[in-house]
Image (cartoon, grey):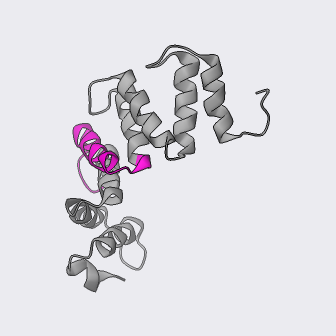
Amino acid sequence: INAEYGDLGNVTARYNLGWCYLNGTGVDKDEKKAFEYFQSAANQEDATAQFILGWCYLNGTGVDKDEKKTAKYYKKAAKQGYSTAQLYLGWCYEQGTGVDKDEKKAVKYYKMAAEQGNPAAYLNLGWCYLNGIGVTRDEDEAKNYYNKIDPGDDDK
């Protein structure tokens, strides 16, 4: 276990210790301790830890559920270019989870994630264009995004 390095403040070790405590790998499972390690790494501006901290707040893992904090930490990670956080922040805006519902902002963040090749972002953008969510309905554009997931058959 990385406890020695985690206690010294090594951000990667703290993040990894969070996962160990979250899953009970090599230690007794302890969601509160996992949250504390994730929080410590997030406070050191680690984008992955910031994303996971948002996930903890969304699911009430080791902490009380708090959708506003979910969006706050997803935003921090998204600003650092973490594509999964951009995707989830888009979902927050699409659903109105922790932020005011804003479908145009949802599309903005989905596009940021898609620019990094995130397949789930292609799926969400395809859905948005197919259904006119935050954009003008456009079946051809929806098809373009869906084809990025599976570019095999252009007649889809």
Report which quarter residue 6 is drawn in.
bottom left
Query: Is 8 placed left or right of 117 in the picture?
Result: left
Residues 14 and 130: in front is 130
| Prevailing SS of the magenta stretch | helix
Who's the residue at 64% across and 32% down the image? 146
Query: Is 57 placed left or right of 106 in the picture?
Result: left
Residue 81, image x and y in percent?
37, 49
Q: Is-magenta flag for residue 79?
A: yes
Who's the residue at 58% across and 28% down the image? 126
Who's the residue at 23% across and 37% down the image? 68
Residue 43, image x and y in percent?
19, 60
Q: Is-magenta flag for residue 31?
A: no
- Which quadrant of the rendered structure holds the C terminus? top right
Residue 88 seen by the camera = yes
Report which quarter residue 15 is drawn in.
bottom left
Against 91, residue 82 (above or below) is below
Against 98, residue 54 (above or below) is below
Who's the residue at 50% across and 14% down the image? 136
Count of numbered labels shown in the rendering: 0
Residue 95 seen by the camera = no
Residues 59 and 99: in front is 99
Residue sitting farthest toward the bottom = 4
Image: magenta residue range: 61-84
Against 40, residue 123 (above or below) is above
- Which quadrant of the rendered structure holds the N terminus? bottom left
Against 155, residue 117 (above or below) is below
Report which quarter residue 70 is drawn in.
top left
Residue 151, image x and y in percent?
72, 39
